[in-house]
Image (spheres, helix red, strand yellow):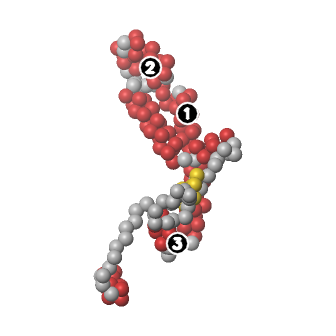
Amino acid sequence: MATTETELGPTTEGPSAATPAVKLSSRKSDSILDRALRLLSSVKFGLIMLGTLLSCCMIGMLVMQVNVDGFQKYYANLKPAQKLVYGSLGFFDIYRSRYFTLLLAITGLNIILASIDRFPAAWQYIRKPKLTASPKFIAAQMFNAEATEREDPNSAAEKIRKAWRK
């Protein structure tokens, strides 16, 4: 499927040595800001951020937090190494730590930028849905299959009409 990153080359029966099948577009002229915005609006980055946020929430659930009753007893039962590591990483008050707040902010920014990036195409589809598909469009879709029918096309079409009426 042709995207902004690739363009489809000429299609032939076999790959030609002279013409590449896929030509990558150069992005050396992109600024650091463009690269950062592209990263922040990518879905892959969003999934990584959500996974990181989920693991921080799991830590916050498994390690007793400072503002919970019984924290003093829990803290007294910890080994000195656990106290040092948990305390230095901020696990005792993880939901108020700076890195958790930063993770929330970056994840929220990712969701907003990814939505803005994809909204025009979604709105175009809502306003004017594509009702016909060209063979190139169908071939570019991730899941496609071809079938051959040995029957007369008119009788096959009539069978399909009858099936849809049911």
Q: Is residue 157 left or right of residue 12?
A: left
Residue plotted at (45% across, 23% down):
92
**Residue 11 percent location from the top left of the image:** 51, 65
* On screen, residue 93 above or below 26: above
- Identify the residue at the far top of this view: 80
Q: CA distance from mark 2 to mark 3?
A: 55 Å
> Which sits in the foreground, 122 or 30?
30
Q: Which residue is mark 3?
A: 130
Question: For the residue carrying disc 2, how many other residues have a C-alpha within 10 Å: few (<14), some (14-19), or many (20+)?
Answer: some
> Which sits in the foreground, 45 or 22?
22
Q: Is residue 111 left or right of residue 150?
A: right
Q: In the rendered image, is residue 34 in sight?
A: no
Amino acid tagged 2? Tyr
Amino acid tagged 1? Thr
**Residue 77 percent location from the top left of the image:** 35, 14
Label 3 sits on a secondary structure element that is: loop
Q: Which residue is mark 2?
A: 86
Q: Nearer the viewer, mark 1 or mark 3?
A: 3
Q: Which residue is mark 1?
A: 101
Question: For the residue carrying disc 1, how many other residues have a C-alpha within 10 Å: few (<14), some (14-19), or many (20+)?
Answer: some
